[in-house]
Amino acid sequence: MPDVLPDLLGAEGVLFDLDGVLTPTAEVHMRAWKAVFDEVFAAWDIAPPYTDADYYEFVDGKKRYDGVASLMHSRNVEVPWGDVYDPPEALTICGIGNRKNAAFAASLRRQGIAAYPGSLALIEKLHAAGVPLGVVSSSKNAEEVLAAAGIRSFFQVVVDGVVAERDGLASKPAPDMFAEGARALGVDPGLSAAVEDATSGAASAAAAGYHVVVGVDRGTGADALRAAGATVVVADLAAFLNVSAGAAGAASDAVAPGAASDSATDSEENE
């Protein structure tokens, strides 16, 4: 049965993950992680080899160093944590994480980035309607990516990896980051929506009490996103553009418990 999409215009606030939701930087992250882990696994003779499945299970959505630690733990490899100032060549959790970040930053500068068209159209629609918007991203590169994509001005708050480290916020799937996003934006999670493409992020938003958790399936899998806490899954945020089309001034309880738009859109229809 197709998902019934809520009218996000009625949300008290909408908070978006960044990589894979607003911009295709998840692909850049994936390539950077693969290059680094392939190198580390080969040098240390770690088996089995690193795969894309490892990215989705152990790395995606988490803070950089937590992702490294999670993956190494999955291979029963003990690596010292080190220090955030470790150079990229350091054989520590932080060193490996910093090596990946250097690869990501170089790729971003070389190739640039643009928002997904459907995501851009949705945030433009919500912004024009006066819906408060925020970004909740584990990445420490969030501000740079938002600026490079030309969309920073749409968001009143950005809770990213820098904020999480500064304020001691636990990594997704803990509720801390999405809870802080709602607090900073001044909205009630129970009347707001969160948008995520990672299972760790969907779990974080659900644990933080968001009534609507939109899963964007860019490869994680609809079933996995729903199991993690997504209340609705789409292939692209363009699916929300025609929800309650023509209904000027959506009802304020459109995202409240038990309420949803009559317009149903299956994620497969938007592939």
Image (cartoon, rainbow, N blue to C red):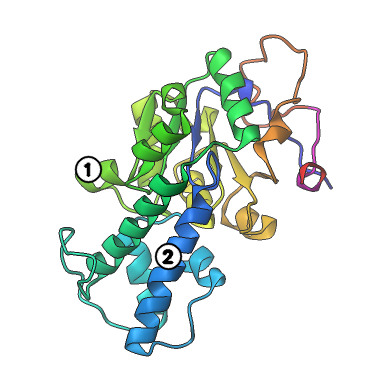
Residue 26 placement (x, y as % from top left): 51, 52
Relative to 129, does residue 174 appear above or below in the rendering? Answer: below
For the residue marked with disc 2, what is the amino acid? Trp
Residue 243 in the magenta stretch? The answer is no
Q: Is residue 76 visible?
A: no
The residue pinned by badge 2 equals 33
Q: Nearer the viewer, residue 242 or 7?
A: 242
Residue 206 placement (x, y as % from top left): 51, 46
- Residue at x 77%, y 13% (from the top left corner): 246
To which quarter of the image does residue 239 belong?
Answer: top right
For the residue marked with disc 1, what is the amino acid? Asp
- Residue at x 61%, y 48% (from the top left corner): 230
Residue 227 placement (x, y as % from top left): 62, 58
- Residue at x 48%, y 86% (from the top left corner): 48
To which quarter of the image does residue 162 belong?
Answer: top left
The residue pinned by badge 1 equals 167
| Left or right, residue 185 beside residue 111 | left
Query: What secondary structure characterizes most of the magenta part?
Result: loop
Q: Residues within 10 Å of mark 2 (few under 14, many from 20)?
A: many
Q: Nearer the viewer, residue 39 or 71?
A: 39
Question: What is the magenta range?
Answer: 262-268
Q: Nearer the viewer, residue 90 or 220?
A: 90
Q: Is residue 200 visible?
A: yes
